[in-house]
């Protein structure tokens, strides 16, 4: 006798991407369950800054996904409003030298041709956007499409809006398969959930879930720290970062890389990033990383030297070797869909990812070409793999 279906789709992962997949799948008419071994936003989402960025992406598949996601986030901002602390405040990328500024302008021109709104900002106009920015910068580029949310709140509200049934504190121990190898649901430490489709939204642990389904997805953890200051008046108006941040994001180096990223929040604290390094799942505090973050932030906003940092926290970005997420159906295991590997862009790219997954689940043509994101693209790909979960 065939097992009775629990639902149409099981989403594994209750972070931002899983929440968005649940929301758009439910709005497409599917019955959804979400399962996570921890609480909502208990992984990478809970350690995120909430960036919704187009400014740091070069023309290509990821930028197309970011522009789609930005449109969807704007609609959710209208729908959910202050509940998720959605702020369409824009971004400001600054250059300290004429040479860096020339490269930034070239990058922005290419982005503009791809649909990004960019406005060059001469040095003498920077104070009108950021009055407390350090003097002496060569110039910058303003990106009005950049925005921010409070990620843990956003994930919780998207899950609530989806109406999906939530199973937290349940560890997925296996992927159920039919006799012909197709997905039939998941096995957890508290019982089975039967469904013809499973979405892997497990973030940094997406490789583990893929392995349970008998396929390889080489997700690596890339550690980052964030410094959080005491609450302040709104002294930083935009997300502000140095132009070399883009190169750090694109780097394949496992070594520590830092570049200053500073932004205020609706609640008052200033968030300071960004660091990247591959050290496995080591959560221990790195004083070199934290010191570099503080020094870089003070270099952009000197007033921060007089401000107390209340805490720092670490998170693990789910990194794939070509810097693109895995999105869509996995032909190696029918019924398995992937939505992970977004590295540091998962909050911003979650909505577009969720929309594309929902379209794939319901047999509709996805509004973006999924070929660059296909999960099986790493077959035969040589990775170091030494710090996979």
Image (cartoon, helix red, strand yellow):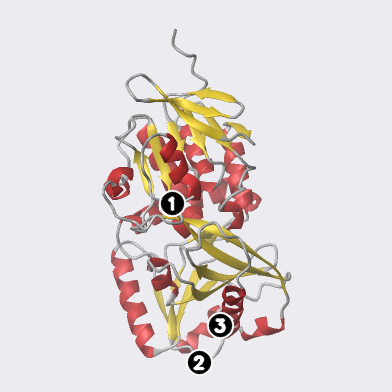
Q: Nearer the viewer, mark 1 or mark 3?
A: 3
Alpha carbon separation for disc pair 1 and 3: 29 Å
Mark 2 or mark 1: name the one nearer the start of the chain: 1
Expressed as whole percent of the image width and height from the top left, the position of residue 336 reads 39, 33
Q: Residues within 10 Å of mark 2 (few under 14, many from 20)?
A: few
Disc 3 designates what residue? 300
Alpha carbon separation for disc pair 3 and 2: 10 Å
Q: Nearer the viewer, mark 3 or mark 2?
A: 3
Q: Residues within 10 Å of mark 1 (few under 14, many from 20)?
A: many
Choose between 95 and 208: the one closer to the eye. Answer: 208
Disc 2 designates what residue? 136
Mark 1 or mark 3: name the one nearer the start of the chain: 1
Q: Taking the image as drawn, is residue 245 in sight?
A: yes
Disc 1 designates what residue? 69
For residue 246, above or below residue 167? below
User: Is label 1 in a helix, a strand or a loop?
Assistant: helix
Residue at the image position 49 percent from the left and 85 percent from the top: 125
> From the image, which quarter does the N terminus lie in?
top left
Choose between 265 and 247: the one closer to the eye. Answer: 247
Mark 3 or mark 2: name the one nearer the start of the chain: 2
Expressed as whole percent of the image width and height from the top left, the position of residue 94 reads 46, 80
User: Is label 2 in a helix, a strand or a loop?
Assistant: loop
């Amino acid at each position: 006798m065939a097992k009775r279906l629990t639902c149409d789709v099981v989403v594994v992962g209750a972070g931002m991407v899983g929440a968005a997949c649940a929301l758009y799948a439910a709005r497409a008419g599917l019955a959804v369950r979400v399962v996570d071994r921890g609480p909502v936003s208990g992984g990478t989402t809970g350690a995120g800054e909430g960036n919704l960025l187009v400014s740091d992406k070069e023309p290509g598949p990821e930028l197309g996904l970011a522009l789609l996601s930005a449109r969807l986030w704007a609609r959710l901002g209208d729908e959910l409003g202050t509940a998720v602390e959605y702020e369409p405040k824009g971004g400001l990328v600054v250059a300290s030298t004429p040479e860096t500024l020339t490269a930034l302008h070239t990058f922005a021109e290419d982005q503009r041709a791809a649909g990004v709104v960019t406005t060059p900002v001469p040095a003498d106009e920077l104070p009108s956007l950021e009055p407390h920015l350090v003097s002496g910068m060569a110039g910058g580029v303003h990106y009005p499409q950049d925005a921010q949310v409070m990620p843990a709140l956003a994930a919780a509200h998207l899950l609530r809006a989806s109406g999906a049934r939530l199973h937290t504190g349940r560890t997925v121990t296996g992927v159920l398969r039919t006799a012909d190898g197709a997905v039939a649901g998941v096995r957890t430490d508290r019982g089975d959930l039967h469904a013809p489709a499973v979405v892997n939204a497990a973030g940094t642990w997406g490789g583990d879930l893929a392995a349970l389904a008998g396929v390889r997805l080489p997700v690596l953890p890339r550690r980052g720290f964030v410094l959080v200051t005491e609450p302040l008046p709104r002294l930083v108006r935009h997300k502000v970062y140095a132009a070399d941040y883009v190169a750090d994001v694109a780097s394949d180096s496992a070594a520590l890389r830092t570049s200053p990223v500073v932004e205020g929040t609706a609640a008052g604290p200033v968030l300071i990033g960004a660091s990247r390094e591959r050290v496995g799942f080591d959560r221990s505090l790195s004083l070199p990383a934290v010191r570099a973050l503080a020094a870089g932030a003070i270099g952009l906003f000197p007033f921060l030297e007089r401000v107390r940092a209340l805490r720092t926290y670490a998170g693990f970005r789910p990194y794939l070797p070509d810097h693109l997420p895995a999105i869509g159906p996995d032909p190696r295991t029918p019924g398995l869909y992937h939505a992970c590997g977004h590295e540091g862009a998962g909050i911003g790219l979650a909505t577009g990812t969720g929309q594309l997954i929902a379209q794939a689940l319901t047999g509709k043509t996805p509004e973006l070409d999924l070929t660059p994101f296909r999960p099986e693209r790493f077959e035969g790909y040589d990775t170091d793999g030494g710090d996979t979960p």
